[in-house]
């Protein structure tokens, strides 16, 4: 058995393994990546890992070893790309041209709006949220609440009037 383990480290055996498995492995990787450059990089890294670890790989399991290494390298690339995309999205969210003073004022204003909406009478708040947040039409609100469209309009009028009075004091 130790002869089989050491055989992989012989250049002619390694070359034979490469010639036997590089094409199916390339197809396997390309099926996953759909990118020729990434495919070639993963293929090369896979055989480099095999060569680096040739003393510990059993000849009979070399095919499984190669496909496992290639798959793991692919998954590492996918994970890395996901982290990069996440960080880019967070960077875009965090980057702003606004001054810190403006951001503080904006935050305070939004808090004031939230408090003002929360302080509305229940019926007015319900109509306001359905209209402005859920984007429902007055007719839909009236049907859902079993009231007339005029009642919805009246509640909305008083909700907006109250909010304008409270928030207009900024």
Image (cartoon, rainbow, N blue to C red):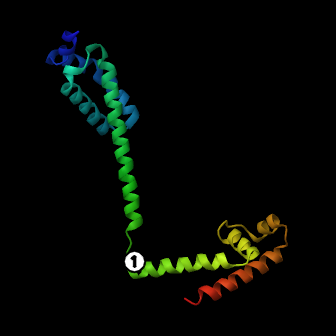
- Secondary structure of residue under mark 1: loop
Horizontal side, residue 65 vs residue 137: left or right: left
Residue at point 31%, 38% (across, down)? 38
Residue 106 position within the rendered picture, expressed as x and y whole percent measured from the top left = 48, 79
Residue 136 position within the rendered picture, expressed as x and y whole percent measured from the top left = 71, 67
Task: Quarter of the image for the C terminus: give it.
Answer: bottom right
Residue at point 38%, 79% (across, down)? 100
Determine which quarter of the picture holds residue 48.
top left
* 135 in relation to 53, above or below: below
Q: Front-most of 107 and 73?
A: 107
Determine which quarter of the picture holds residue 51.
top left
Tell me the crowding category of disc 1: few under 14, some 14 to 19, or many 20 or more residues within 10 angstroms, Cα based: few
Horizontal side, residue 99 vs residue 157: left or right: left
Count of marks placed on residues: 1
Q: Front-most of 9 and 137?
A: 9
- Check disc 1 and report the residue beneath it: 98
Name of the residue lying farthest toward the bottom = 169
Residue at point 34%, 33% (across, down)? 72
Horizontal side, residue 12 vs residue 75: left or right: left
């Amino acid at each position: 058995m130790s002869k089989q383990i050491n055989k992989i480290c012989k250049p002619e055996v390694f070359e034979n393994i490469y010639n036997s498995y590089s094409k199916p492995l390339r197809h396997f990787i390309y099926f996953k990546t759909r990118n020729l450059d990434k495919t070639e990089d993963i293929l090369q890294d896979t055989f480099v890992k095999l060569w680096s670890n040739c003393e510990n790989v059993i000849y009979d399991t070399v095919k499984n070893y190669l496909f496992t290494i290639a798959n793991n390298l692919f998954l590492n690339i996918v994970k890395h790309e996901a982290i990069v995309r996440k960080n880019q999205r967070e960077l875009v969210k965090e980057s702003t041209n606004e001054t810190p003073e403006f951001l503080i004022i904006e935050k305070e204003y939004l808090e004031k709006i939230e408090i003002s909406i929360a302080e509305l009478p229940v019926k007015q708040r319900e109509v306001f949220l359905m209209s402005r947040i859920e984007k429902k039409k007055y007719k839909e609100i009236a049907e859902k609440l079993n009231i007339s469209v005029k009642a919805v309009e009246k509640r909305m009028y008083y909700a907006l009037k109250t909010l304008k009075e409270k928030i207009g004091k900024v």
